[in-house]
Image (cartoon, rainbow, N blue to C red):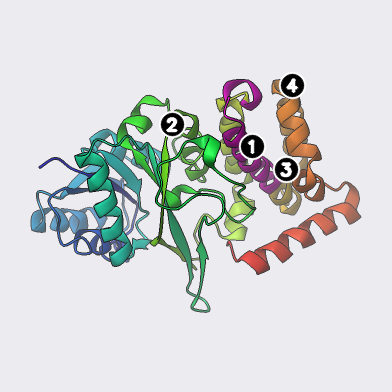
Amino acid sequence: MGKTITFGIPCYNSAEYMDHCISSIVEGCGAAADVQVVVVDDGSTKDNTLEKATEWHERYPDIVQVVHQENGGHGRAVMTAIEHAEGAYFKVVDSDDWVDKDALMALLEQLRSFVTFKVDVDLVVTNYVFEHVEDGKQRTVEYGFALPKRKVIGWHQIGHFNMTQYMLMHALCYRTEVLRSCGLELPAHTFYVDNIYAYVPLPHCKTLFYLDVDLYRYFIGRDDQSVNLDMQIARIDQQLTVTRIMMRAYHLYEDVPQKRLRSYMIGHFTLMMSVCSVISKMSDAPDARKNLDDFWHELMRYDMRMYSRARHGIVGTFTNFRGPVGERVTIGIYHAAQWLMKFN
């Protein structure tokens, strides 16, 4: 039996929590023979991540594959998992996250149907759930109204995505060949590359399918997580790097003919530019504001229409007020959104 899906699990000093992640997939699917799990040990040094991964391989040698590499960061580990993928479809699950058993079985059933009946679907979208450990609360991101349910569609059939509905990595299950042929490159030693992963392949996906199940459980609560606000401020240079790669991936108004996909992608890119703007204003780094201004000017030179949409739309305007008072207003708006939507 061929593999229906490969789950790539990047691990770096993950021994404390990786068992839960791997178990949720391997044992959650009943050790199904058409499932592959590629655990990438990204040069762990502080714990027994590699040994734990090897134990899983020894228990399930036909399902779990272990790859050890020198440390290259999350993006390089994802690329390595794609290289070793045998499944028709591919999904990333970070080692501190997990998947829901019932939703996993529903996804497998759907993917098996696509494979058996040779239905060409390039992207399957599922819901994900923020699991906030500090207060035990959850918030589900789902795509009702934006995507018709259980229907193979093209981009011309998608609806409007609101600010809380961007299709982040946690929601996406790509056809593996799309990832290998779309020119996807994730830079080494860089955080936030999941935004590239959720952006660059989209124009190469001709068909998509929305399965309305709460599959991915996204752990929020570790102090060293990349989405932690203090970490975001400290790594503003990496946020700029990722957003620059997204910018240069496409001249959206020229390269993406599907109007609704283009509108979605400019919205995602605008949100990234806005995050860069707000985090730069929070940073104490002496060159943070200059680097931000330089980036806006670079965008203006690269593509005036993308610049105008990102800078002078509603989101761009409210995240780029000038002067000390304007900056305080911008940061206040961000904190209000953070409290309301609990995204970090």
Residue 230 placed where, x, y %? 61, 59
Q: Which of labels 3 and 1 is toward the front?
A: 1
| Span colored in magenta | 252-276
Mark 4 belongs to which amino acid? Arg
Q: Which of labels 2 and 4 is toward the front?
A: 2
Task: Give the camera-side residue of 156 and 20.
Answer: 156
Mark 2 belongs to which amino acid? Lys
For marks 1 and 4, give the CA distance: 21 Å
Residue that appears at 45% across and 48% down? 169
Quadrant of the rendering where the N terminus is positioned: top left
Mark 3 belongs to which amino acid? Ala
Mark 1 closeness class: few <14, some 14–19, many ≥20 residues within 10 Å? some
Q: Are marks 3 and 1 in contact (CB under 8 Å)?
A: no
Q: Earlier in the sequence, mark 2 or mark 4?
A: 2
Instruction: Tell me the number on the disc at residue 288.
Output: 3
Residue 53, quarter of the rendered image: bottom left
For marks 1 and 2, give the CA distance: 16 Å
Mark 3 closeness class: few <14, some 14–19, many ≥20 residues within 10 Å? many
Instruction: Tell me the number on the disc at residue 301.
Output: 4
Secondary element at tag 3: helix
For marks 2 and 4, give the CA distance: 30 Å
Q: Are marks 1 and 4 in contact (CB under 8 Å)?
A: no
Residue that appears at 66% across and 63% down? 338
